[in-house]
Amino acid sequence: QSVLTQPPSVSAAPGQTVTISCSGSSSDIGSNYVSWYQQFPGTAPKLLIYDNDKRPSGIPDRFSGSKSGTSATLGITGLQTGDEADYYCGTWDSSLSGGVFGGGTKLSVL
Amino acid sequence: QVQLVQSGTEVKKPGASVKVSCQASGYTFTNYGIYWVRQAPGQGLELMGWISAYNDHTNYVQTLQGRVTMTTDASTDTAYLELRSLKSDDTAVYYCARGGVRRGSCSGGRCRVLADYWGQGALVTVSS
């Protein structure tokens, strides 16, 4: 069972906006930075968002991140069928003195 | 361009050991660290630990303590993951990813997991 809680699945229609939540505690999300990763089946994860809301070079601005208290959110606007993937949040857990990932969320674009 | 190239598929029997390699290119190896992350079939990502390629400091997840060793070889820009006393539930794809050079990659009192480049993964199957 993951330290960080994500919904197992979310879905939305093409062109719509979707948000994926990541819930933690004061020792992880509450006091550290959050990153988000996108993973297509059979491939390695890819960094989407780091330090709560920063996008690496090459990541479209349709992807955004935010953090409030002990929760973080990944937002995707203008959904495309090519966004269908698994999404994971990650952060440092100060009580474990180690990094942790959420359980992942499967995005379906209907 | 940054690349991490991992060794190939392994099939091991329970109780055996496995060593997975991750060769880096396109950046100064000793300026960063390496995360090791595994993913069991149909499951999520599990962060196994991290090693600094600068000073070989390590940080292992508690559940693997005593069975896992992470090392680096700066002469070949390669990181290694060794997992011993293999069990069937160690069957997974093992990924390396580039991380910070210091444990937790902390700044301003806040730390992070920032895995910005990933290897292609190495499937390890444990079966009798």
Image (cartoon, rainbow, N blue to C red):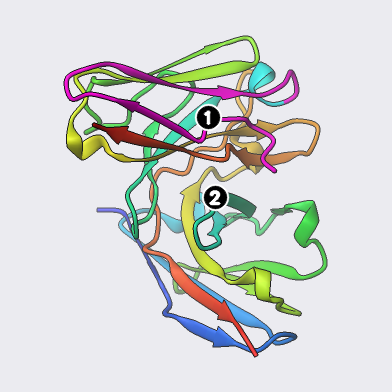
Tally of marks: 2
Please state the extent of the stretch shown in magenta in the rendering.
A1-27
Report if the CB atoms under discs 1 and 2 are less than 8 Å apart: no
Q: Position of residue A57 (x, y in %)?
A: 26, 32
* SS at badge 1: loop
Q: Is residue B7 above or below residue A104?
A: below
Q: Which residue is painted at 51% across and 65% down in the image?
A: B94
Q: Quadrant of the C terminus of chain A?
A: top left
Count neighbours of disc 1 (C-alpha within 10 A) and say few if under 14, some if 14 to 19, many if 20 or more.
Answer: some
Q: Position of residue A64 (x, y in %)?
A: 35, 19
Q: Is residue B110 above or below residue B42?
A: above
Q: The disc numbered 1 marks a residue on which chain?
A: A
Q: Which residue is painted at 28% across and 16% down in the image?
A: A17
**Amino acid, disc 1:** Pro
Q: The disc numbered 2 marks a residue on which chain?
A: B
Q: Position of residue B5 (x, y in %)?
A: 36, 68
Q: Position of residue A42 (x, y in %)?
A: 34, 60
Magenta stretch encompasses residue B111: no
* SS at badge 2: strand
A12 or A34, which is in the foreground? A12
Count neighbours of disc 2 (C-alpha within 10 A) and say few if under 14, some if 14 to 19, many if 20 or more.
Answer: many
Q: Is residue B114 visible?
A: yes
Q: Which residue is painted at 38% across and 49% down in the image?
A: B117
Q: Quadrant of the N terminus of chain A?
A: top right
Q: Is residue B97 above or below residue A7?
A: below
**Amino acid, disc 2:** Leu
A63 or A107, which is in the foreground? A107
Q: Residue B45, labelled with which disc?
A: 2
